[in-house]
Image: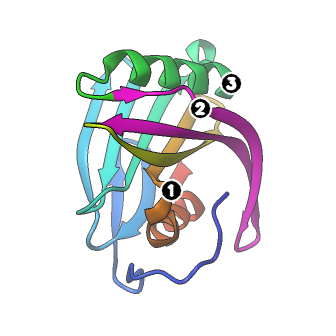
Amino acid sequence: MLTACESSLDISKTKEYSKNGIHFTLPAQWDVTEDEDDEGFRYIVVEDSDVATLIINSYPTPSAPTLNDYVNDMIETSVADLTIGSREKGAISEISTTIGAQVFVGIQNSFTITLFGVEVPFTANFYDKKSDSQVVHIMSQAPTEDLADAAPGFELILASFSLD
């Protein structure tokens, strides 16, 4: 769950991202590292300079997977695609968080990645946003020990996210 924790992330300095109907505010020190559009399917990656990642997938409404299917696909893909080390599927639970006046209900995946014998716990949170023409799934992920530092950035993006 995203929580209001103390963080070293300075979200008083932000920047706006607006392209092809998707808009959000992100911390100034974070970057959009990918924005791909393939026949209506859109894939956007936002990363901090360290360990936090946020992925936005946009689908035309008729072809959009449910949030549960999206979560399961992301887990299966990340387990299969990890080329160094290993990743367990982990535990899945329903989550709810309030940011400002907005309540977000989603799914959390707590899992461990093992690399060179070192186990690193991770937390991934999944949410969706919908419009008449598209469904957007948003996944935020960070090592669990760094989640308190990344959470304000994730919350900023989630709370400011809008679709045309």
Q: Which contiguous range is marked in magenta?
A: 86-115
The crowd level at tag 2 (other Cα within 10 Å; few <14, some 14-19, many 20+) is some
Query: Measured along the vertical axis of the image, is residue 152 above or below residue 121?
Result: below
- Residue located 36% across and 32% down the image: 43
Q: Which residue is mark 2?
A: 90
- Image spot of residue 123 (x, y percent): 54, 48
The residue mark sitting in front, 3 or 2, is 2
Question: Is residue 114 in the magenta section?
Answer: yes
Answer with the quarter of the image where residue 111 lies. top right
In terms of depth relative to the viewer, which is nearer, 102 or 76? 76
Q: Magenta residues: mostly which secondary structure?
A: strand
Instruction: Tell me, yes or no, whether the two marked residues, 1 and 2, touch with CB atoms within 8 Å.
Output: no
Q: Quadrant of the N terminus?
A: bottom right
The crowd level at tag 3 (other Cα within 10 Å; few <14, some 14-19, many 20+) is few
The three-letter code of the residue at mark 2 reads Gly
Q: Which residue is mark 1?
A: 144
Q: SS at mark 3?
A: helix
Please state if 149 lies on the left or on the right of 69 as rendered.
Answer: left
The numbered dot on residue 1 is none
Q: SS at mark 2?
A: loop
> Whole-Å distance between the Cαs marked 3 and 1?
22 Å
Answer with the quarter of the image where residue 41 lies. top left
- Image spot of residue 79 (x, y percent): 42, 21
Q: Which residue is mark 3?
A: 68
Please state if 47 lies on the left or on the right of 87 as rendered.
Answer: left
